[in-house]
Image: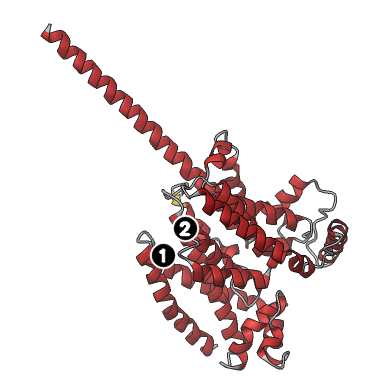
Amino acid sequence: MFGAIFLILVLFGISQPIMNGLQKRHPYLKAGLLNQMFWYHMFFGLVYYTYTLFNRSDSVLYFLNAKSGYQNWFDAFHAGTEFVEWLAYPLVNYLQFNYEMVMFFSTWIGFIGFIYFYCFFKENLRFNPKFEGWDAITIFMFLPNMHFWTASLGKGAIIFGGLGLMTYGLSLPGKRIPQLVIGGFLVYMIRPHIFFALLIGMAVGYVLGREKVPLYQKYLTALAGIVLSVLFYEKIILYLGYDPNNLLQSFEEESALNVQRLQNAGSAVDMGNYSLPMKLFTFWFRPLFIDSPNVLGIIVSMENLLYIYMFSKIFHKDFIKFIKQAPAMVKMSGIVFFSISISMTYIMSNLGIIIRQKSQIMFYMLFVIVAFLDWQKTQRIKKRGEIYNRIVETERKRLAESAESTEK
């Protein structure tokens, strides 16, 4: 464990220039908050490591496979589970990291995702939306379930780090190529279909967004997204285990098989007969307290109540108007969130798996909601400004008329 403690201190030092560089580009960022987030996330790395001492964890298998499952490094270079082992291979075999050190290095990758999601939220909002007087974005960044499932050697930490980098890069794609390339690579190698959804979301959001961008640039971006989607289509479909020539039937067969597997894993929810809205509700907001058999389930239930509360904010007459006017990043986030949610509802029927998988995309929903709240506040300020200007203009006219009548 001494090696892991030393590594955490080294990673804290490595994080400082990254955070300082972001703070120079974004002066509104708080270095102190980011440092607190680092130690908070490392604490959850310790919590997850303790969890693995008493429960079965895939992280142990990843470590053992990386250590002795391949003759050389690039034997493991494949999308999916093997990519986790490919990343761990040089750490284990060249740098001689033990299990604890590889765990905390992966925890750090998850922390990188939080940094860049935080930057993405802050730079795309004018105000700090509040939740009962508390800064909503700060609350989102410290949700326990988000940190727990992104704090171990596994797909969760790696893809979350990649999503944070890629999403931040998409805000200014021409100026953030390193973040786009690294983030896109991580996302694609862990879950190609999520990378596929981001490409589609980017293309559609960029075309439909209200940014003042030359029309040819919008269509070039959309065209690039479509071309990449077409190029990757067959490979992604094959990766997911479907037949590209008979997609619908193979999707139904694979979905039924996955449901059966997940039901046999415990904590099963029979979603086969659920309507689509009920499937989505289950995926987004369960478990609730009646589904929670342990402490972890109770904590997740409390987070889900927060999600329900935040989601209720969009049931407002102005939301459709907002979506029509929304910038590209909002539309991209909405498309990514709903498209991935719908696809996952057909293969998920185990609450344990649902809790883990949805942590990868919930920030997109939360961003759409706080962007809506931000827009509402902007509209209220504009309306007050218009009322003030009318009052000033009315008073000016009254004084002018009064002065004119006095002269007469």
Which disc number belongs to residue 138?
2
Q: Which residue is drawn at 58% across and 77% down?
A: 106
Which disc number belongs to residue 302?
none
Return the residue nearer the eye: 227 or 360: 227
Q: Residue furthest left?
A: 407
Q: Do the residues labelled 2 and 1 touch (CB within 8 Å)?
A: yes
Relative image position of residue 179 (x, y in whole percent): 51, 69
Return the residue nearer the eye: 265 or 220: 220
Colour scheme of the rendered structure: secondary structure
Q: Which residue is drawn at 67% across and 87% down?
A: 74
- Left or right for 375, reference 351: left
* The N terminus lies in quadrant: bottom right
- Taking the image as drawn, is residue 303 in sight? no
Q: Taking 203 as reference, is 153 above or below it?
A: below
Q: What residue type is labelled 2?
A: Thr
Q: Which residue lies furthest to the top in this view?
A: 408
Query: Which residue has dot 1 on it?
Result: 33
For mark 1, give the secondary structure.
helix
